[in-house]
Amino acid sequence: MDTSHATADSLLQPFRLGDLTLPNRVVMAPLTRGRAGKERIPNPLMAKYYVQRASAGLIVAEATTISEQANGWLESPGIYTDAMEAGWKAVTTAVHAAGGRIFLQLWHMGRASHSDFHGGSLPVSASAVKIDGDGINTPLGKKLYETPRALETREIAGVVADYRRAAARARAAGFDGVEIHAANGYLIDQFLQAKTNLRTDDYGGSIEKRARLLKEVVEAVSAEWPAGRVGVRISPNGVFNDMGSPNFREQFTHVATMLDRCGLAYLHVVDGLAFGFHKLGEPMTLTEFRRVFHGPLMGNCGYTVESAEQAVAAGLADLVAFGRPYISNPDLVERFRHGWPLAKPADMAAWYSPTGATGYTDFPAYAPG
């Protein structure tokens, strides 16, 4: 995409996110890159990667698991041991020294996992509903998805407690805030959506009950952080991980209305359709969310500098998150500011594979000719 004639006047204006001042409204979206090694401990290479991108108004660090039960992606980082916390502390220290601001995304994969990650025990979910997909990469190779085990009602408090402990560790590790991952077909989204939540207890059976887990997680995390340093990410239009429910509009309108009362840092909506669309109705838009959520709103998925500028200038989005462009453009903000072209997109083969610096930290900043 050539941005040489694009302007980003509104996108590059500072933004007050609670008590945190962001120098611009460009957010680095959380990107799973699989560089944390088998022990899932953040390392100096990851610190270099984030430092390269520290000119973003805000970095939302990659999805990071809150417990062993939450795992399900090869060599993704965690935040549930002292060593993981110390590894992240080195990352945040480096990012802050480079002038950046960084939140941590808290993640539980739920059914999008496999028993190979859990010593033979099945992954857990809201209900025993299997992903219809082509399989998952596990420590023992690619396998078919399994039918997950539905969490017992009595177990859910323990999952909520895991989120709280992870949030506390994120604060100790020096992050500026946390984002609760309630999108893309992972555990909280599995509870939110009727397609995957067939429960008849206090966590299913109605729009309100399906949102209960998210509500409890927000409350638990907000006990460790001021609510103004807590964001939530949702994906009402998404089909990733075999999601999409007929009553998605009613469900996510309720979710946004509920979250509006929580005083959050922001609501991060994957409103774009570039990641797939379930086609169960007209896609939900930021305009709809503006009607019920009055705090900062972040758009995401498939934005260009032009569409992001339009969304911010029109007051639809306060912030816009960019994912894939940040892989091969560590200086994305500078490219937007000067109208420089974007680099050739990174080869997808290097996105997740544990290939070290290759396809990760080896993308140069733009050199004007």
Image (tube, helix red, strand yellow):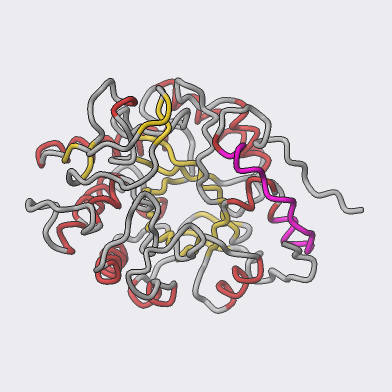
Residue depicted at x 39% and y 36%:
136
**Residue 343 in magenta?**
yes
Q: Is residue 143 above or below residue 300?
A: above
Q: In this view, does 2 lie to the left or right of 26?
A: right
**Which quadrant of the figure contains the N terminus?**
bottom right
Residue depicted at x 46% and y 32%:
76
Pinpoint residue 272: horizontal percent, then vertical percent: 49, 65
Name the residue at the right extreme. 369
**Residue 19 in magenta?**
no
Residue depicted at x 13% and y 62%:
206
Using the rendered view, name the quadrant where residue 2 is placed: bottom right
- Highlighted magenta segment, given as a residue range: 333-351
Name the residue at the left extreme. 201
Q: Is residue 45 left or right of residue 122?
A: right
Residue depicted at x 71% and y 49%:
331
Q: In this view, does 323 lie above or below 11?
A: above
Q: Nearer the viewer, residue 18 or 332?
A: 332
Pinpoint residue 250: horizontal percent, then vertical percent: 25, 71
Using the rendered view, name the quadrant where residue 313 is placed: bottom right
Pinpoint residue 96: horizontal percent, then vertical percent: 60, 39
Number of callouts: 0
Q: Is residue 327 left or right of residue 352?
A: right
Q: Which of 70 and 164 is in front in this view?
A: 70
Pinpoint residue 214: horizontal percent, then vertical percent: 26, 52
